Image (tube, rainbow, N blue to C red):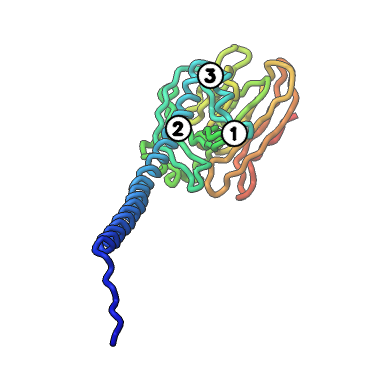
Amino acid sequence: MQPTVASPPKSKHWLILVLLALIVVITGAFGFFIYQNYHSKYKTDIPATSQQVKTQNNSLENTVAAFFQAVQAEDKKTVKNLLSENVNNVPSLYTQDFSFAIKESKISSSSKKAYVYVDLNVSEQIIENVLVLIKNDSGHWLIIDSQSVVLSEDVPPFARQESQSSDLKRVLLTLVGPADFYLTSPEGTHTGFNAEAQKQVSEIADVGYNGPEAIIETLSITGLLGVWELNIIGNGNGEYQLGTELIDNKNHQTQIIKNNTTKGAIDSFILEYPYETGKPLQVTEVK
């Protein structure tokens, strides 16, 4: 005879069903929470990344705009604060009236380096500046390098570089220290600061000069063909630094020449574009 198994009380049946229902509800709620959390994160990641890039572009373009506005206001303190301590080639600083337009900007894949194209309108001459910026440890963009090229063709930014021909012999000269530029073309025309007349002259069509009052004087030359004469005229006592840069994608060479000067002293140099790739601008001092 089989032993009789007592059925559990009905109250226990209801208790078991209630516990099972609670487990199902809790599990479902937890799963829904995980799904919502993942879905919410996935949805916000992409817009956040896009917004971050947009913010970075605005930030670096604001830095460049602030730089040129400080130049216009002759606010040297602000200019200095926007330049990196490791600056290689400071953008041209204009003390005469000019306007600027930021054309386009790009950030590197590392988000640590950026490039900004700016067109300057100086005396109805368009000078394109390609500014290089780096992000410092504090997350601020600082200007570290620049190239200036005088252009006449009206083509979009970033397409200009490919359209430039090395045959144009583009050169950028910079001068730091107590001295001024005075350039003479093979035809005998001049651009720079005429010390005898105490005035700025701009007789060479394809040469841009930023003036003797600039923190760093620059000469942007398009078409350095033949033999040119460069005079560096001292306006005080001390050391000056002459920088040369070839604006040539295939032969981008730079150099720094240092000399001491006194007020009124003239150092004369002969400039010739190099015939060999890999060579910097040929600068011969005339004793």
Work out whether mark 1 precedes mark 3 in sequence or the reverse, and give the earlier one.
1
Work out whether mark 1 precedes mark 2 in sequence or the reverse, and give the earlier one.
2
Residue at the (37%, 48%) spot, across then down: 41
Residue 239 located left or right of residue 15: right
Distance Cα–Cα, label 1 vs label 3: 24 Å
Residue at the (26%, 65%) spot, across then down: 9
Is residue 51 positioned above or below 23 on the image?
above
Instruction: Identify the mark at residue 59; answer none if there is no mark.
Output: 2
Residue 156 located left or right of residue 142: left
Residue 203 % position (x, y): 50, 23
Look at mark 3 in the image and give the residue it sits on.
201
Q: Mark 2: few, some, or many residues within 10 Å (few <14, many ≥20)?
A: some
Q: Residue furthest top?
A: 197
Q: Are marks 2 and 3 in contact (CB under 8 Å)?
A: no
**Nearer to us in this view, 145 or 262:** 145
* SS for dot 2: helix
In this rendering, which labeled residue sits more in front, label 1 or label 3? 1
**Amino acid, disc 1:** Asn
Residue at the (57%, 32%) spot, across then down: 186
Is residue 6 positioned above or below 274 on the image?
below
Give the quarter of the figure containing the C terminus.
top right
In this rendering, which labeled residue sits more in front, label 2 or label 3? 2
Residue 258 % position (x, y): 72, 31
In this rendering, which labeled residue sits more in front, label 1 or label 2? 2
Give the quarter of the figure containing the N terminus.
bottom left
Work out whether mark 2 precedes mark 3 in sequence or the reverse, and give the earlier one.
2
Instruction: Identify the mark at residue 89; answer none if there is no mark.
Output: 1
Is residue 266 positioned above or below 61 on the image?
above
**Nearer to us in this view, 196 or 175:** 175
**Amino acid, disc 2:** Ser
Residue at the (40%, 44%) spot, across then down: 49
Residue 23 % position (x, y): 32, 58
